[in-house]
Each structure stands twice: as structure tokens, then as C-alpha cells.
Amino acid sequence: MPAIRNQIRELRALREITQQELADKIGVARQAVIAMEQDKYSPSLETAFKVAMALGVSLEQCFQYDPRGKR
């Protein structure tokens, strides 16, 4: 099963942004940010772009695709 991994937690910590602050910036619930950080939820493409923009990085810096499904 393919997996999308992300660096949200690390990037958010570097910028000293709380989960709630990120959630507010991208228009989702804090629980969605938690699920994304734990690789339990893969956001829509639009939300992924919003996350990357809110964190000031490219989409590729924030999200990585592993076709082998390794998490």
C-alpha cells in the first residue's frame, strides 16, 4: 500500500507554531493536523499545498510519497 509521509511536526516545531495555529491557518480541525503528523491521514492536494504554504516550504519538502508503502 503506497504511503505519503510528511515532515509537518518537524517543520512546525522549527517555526514554533502550535497544532492549533497551523489548523487555523489551513482551515482544518486540530485533530486533522494531529492525524497528518502521525501519518494516519493523507490530506487532499489542496490541503497539502495549504500546509506547505503555511510552513513556508515546498510541497516536496513537506510531503514525500513512498510507492513501496513503507512508513
Image (tube, rainbow, N blue to C red):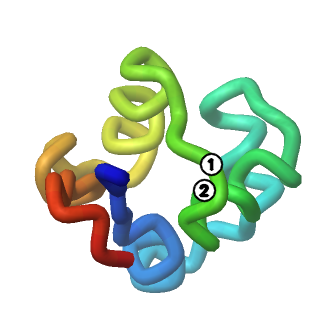
User: In this figure, what is the number of numbered marks?
Assistant: 2
Q: Which residue is mark 2?
A: 36
Pointer 2 with pointer 1, Cβ within 8 A: yes
Q: Is residue 43 above or below residue 52?
A: above
Q: Amino acid at mark 2?
A: Met
Tell me if 34 is positioned left or right of 13 in this view: right
Image coordinates for residue 56, horizontal then vertical, percent:
28, 49
| Label 2 secondary element | helix
Tell me if 6 is positioned left or right of 9 in this view: left
Point 12% across, 49% down: residue: 60
10 Å crowding of disc 2: few (<14), some (14-19), many (20+): many
46 vs 70, nearest the viewer: 70
Image coordinates for residue 27, horizontal then vertical, percent:
72, 25
The residue sitting at the top extreme is 46
Tell me if 2 is positioned left or right of 32 in this view: left
10 Å crowding of disc 1: few (<14), some (14-19), many (20+): some
Point 77% across, 31% down: residue: 28
Image coordinates for residue 48, horizontal then vertical, percent:
41, 33
Between marks 2 and 1, how big is the CA–CA gap?
Answer: 5 Å
* The C terminus, quarter of image: bottom left
Q: Which residue is mark 1?
A: 41
Image coordinates for residue 35, horizontal then vertical, percent:
72, 58
63 vs 57, nearest the viewer: 63
Tell me if 51 is positioned left or right of 1 in this view: right
